[in-house]
Amino acid sequence: MAKAPTKKKPKLRRKVQSGRVYIQSSYNNTMVTVTDDKGNVIIGSSAGRAGFAGARKATPFAAQQVMAKVIEQIPSVGLQDIEVFVKGIGSAREAAIRSLAGAGLRITNIRDITPIPHNGVRPPKRRRV
């Protein structure tokens, strides 16, 4: 006998007043993640998910489009105050922050969390000729 089809539960969205936006910008891609204060992911998107491919994923325009997609979803969560954490060395960092600032959200803090080497890698052996 065939089983009766089970009804799928609707996904519940939590209402959050304040949260964090993580922007990771590399030479190859731009990724944006929105979390609550505890670090639970609410919204996530990337340039590849927005329809860009290859070298176009790392452009400032692609970052702007990714932030536009994320900003569309923010009102359904109820987010108002955000902290922005930027990581990476890509060219899309500024464009992502500018489009976020123009969205009408209250940005309380912008912090650069790009890892910086303290001593670097070990140099190669001395050349013998």
Image (cartoon, rainbow, N blue to C red):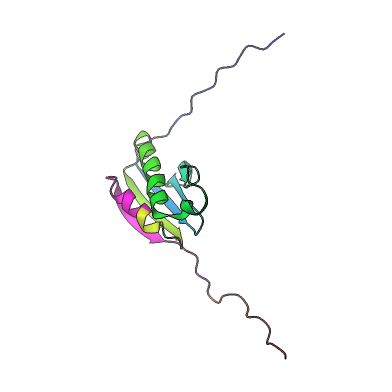
Left or right side of 60 for 39? right
Residue at 42 percent across and 58 percent down: it is: 86
Residue in front for this viewpoint, 21 or 30: 30
Residue at 53 percent across and 71 percent down: it is: 117
Q: Is residue 126 magenta?
A: no
Q: Is residue 2 above or below residue 18?
A: above
Q: Is residue 118 above or below residue 83?
A: below
Q: Is residue 107 magenta?
A: yes
How far across and how far down the image is residue 103, in percent?
Answer: 29, 45
Residue furthest bottom in the image: 129
How far across and how far down the image is residue 12, in percent?
Answer: 46, 29
Disc tally is: 0
Residue at 41 percent across and 50 percent down: it is: 63
How far across and how far down the image is residue 113, in percent?
Answer: 45, 61
Residue furthest top in the image: 1
**Quadrant position of the N terminus in the picture:** top right
**Quadrant position of the C terminus in the picture:** bottom right
Residue in front for this viewpoint, 71 or 112: 71
Which residues make up the magenta segment?
96-117
How far across and how far down the image is residue 7, in percent?
Answer: 55, 17
Which quadrant of the figure has residue 18?
top left
Left or right side of 13 for 124? right
